[in-house]
Amino acid sequence: MSDLPFKGRVALVTGASRGIGRAVALGLAKAGAHVVITARSLSQLESLDDEIQAAGGAATLLHLDLKKGDRIDQLGPTLFQRWEKLDILIANAGILGPLSPLGHITEDGFLTTIDVNLNANWRLIRTLDPLLKRSDAGRAVFVTSGAAKGTYAYWGPYAASKAGLEALVKSWAAELENTNVRANLINPGATRTQMRAKAFPGENSATLPAPEDLVPLFLELASPLCQRNGDVVKFRDWRPEDEPSSTRSPAEVAGTAEL
Ligand SMILES: NC(=O)c1ccc[n+]([C@@H]2O[C@H](COP(=O)([O-])OP(=O)(O)OC[C@H]3O[C@@H](n4cnc5c(N)ncnc54)[C@H](OP(=O)(O)O)[C@@H]3O)[C@@H](O)[C@H]2O)c1
């Protein structure tokens, strides 16, 4: 695997047990990175680990509940002990939270959404910033949503969490300008995952892009060659440099509601 583009690089992926995070972790491992895969569902992480090993890659499994701030705070010291650096952070995990009128939402429903989608990412930044700066080209990619614009009724907690995330990551990117680290966000658009099915249960998911379709965009932003910083990249608008726009499938350009 010596000529793989991410050989020797260490990547941490949150929400790697299913959906977009799982596909990206597998993609990074196949491209040569050692992936630290995190989530709450250990059995799903083990199944991903099997797939990574079968593909010739390597992973470290880490049970991590992003509601537990003290566990996130331990990540930096733990990774430092083993690798002394982190090359790639894929901060992907997220929850939909309650879809209800704001006046009907419980305190727990609101605060948990903000905790997982926003506060956990601030804690990841705080504990991993020094490790990313020890890499020759630290790259951080966060996952936002079109809902961050706040234009949908009943999506308040999720929309607020993603709007906050965008502001947080752009602020950090501005701090990083004169370092080797770059931080950006991806807006995946409608993608065939459990979260999407929960939000739009009547939808024909076969019309949606699969999580695997997003992997090349994540790899581009995770690459040492990426010089973007503080950008929100919409998957729908993105084209790999060597691909003409006409090669995208109809599902990839479908005008489905954003999540
Ligand atoms: N799918 C879409 O259409 C879409 C569109 C726009 C943005 N997004 C964003 O894309 C990201 C990935 O979403 P997805 O569609 O792949 O969702 P998904 O299939 O529901 O996966 C969510 C992931 O987050 C993890 N997670 C949830 N709560 C957690 C917690 N408390 N601690 C640790 N991990 C937790 C889950 O793992 P465990 O349950 O095992 O912990 C799972 O791996 C999210 O940030 C989402 O907001 C998705």
Image (spheres, grey):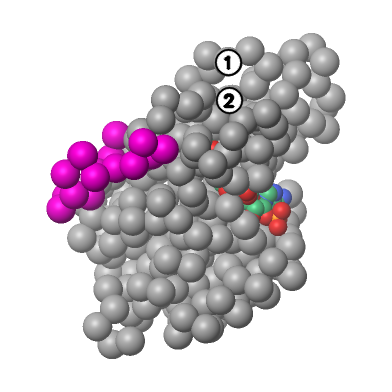
Q: CA distance from mark 1 to mark 2?
A: 8 Å
| Residue 87 located left or right of residue 42 | left
Q: Quadrant of the C terminus?
A: top right
| Residue 97 versus residue 73 in the image, above or below | above
Of the pair 155 and 128, the residue shown nearer to us: 155
Of the pair 95 and 12, the residue shown nearer to us: 95
Viewer-nearest of discs 1 and 2: 1
Locate residue 237, reporting x and y percent. 29, 34
Some atom of ligand 1 lies within 8 Å of the CB belonging to the residue at label 1: no
What residue do we see at 58% from left, 52% from top? Answer: 19
Residue type at mark 1 is: Tyr
Q: Is residue 236 visible?
A: yes
| Residue 241 located left or right of residue 45 | left
Q: Is residue 79 visible?
A: no
Mark 1–mark 2 CB contact (< 8 Å): yes
Magenta stretch: give its range: 237-252
| Residue 57 versus residue 196 in the image, above or below | below
| Mark before the other along the chain sequence, 1 or 2 | 1
Reading the image, the residue beneath label 1 is: 152
* Label drawn at residue 178: none
- Determine crowd level at label 1: few under 14, some 14-19, many 20+ residues with C-alpha closer than 10 A: few
Residue type at mark 2 is: Ala
Locate residue 10, reporting x and y percent. 43, 73
- Determine crowd level at label 2: few under 14, some 14-19, many 20+ residues with C-alpha closer than 10 A: many
Q: Quadrant of the N terminus?
A: bottom left
Does residue 58 belong to the magenta stretch? no
Locate residue 213, reporting x and y percent. 41, 51
Reading the image, the residue beneath label 2 is: 159
Based on the displayed image, in which of its 4 quarters is residue 111 positioned?
Answer: top right
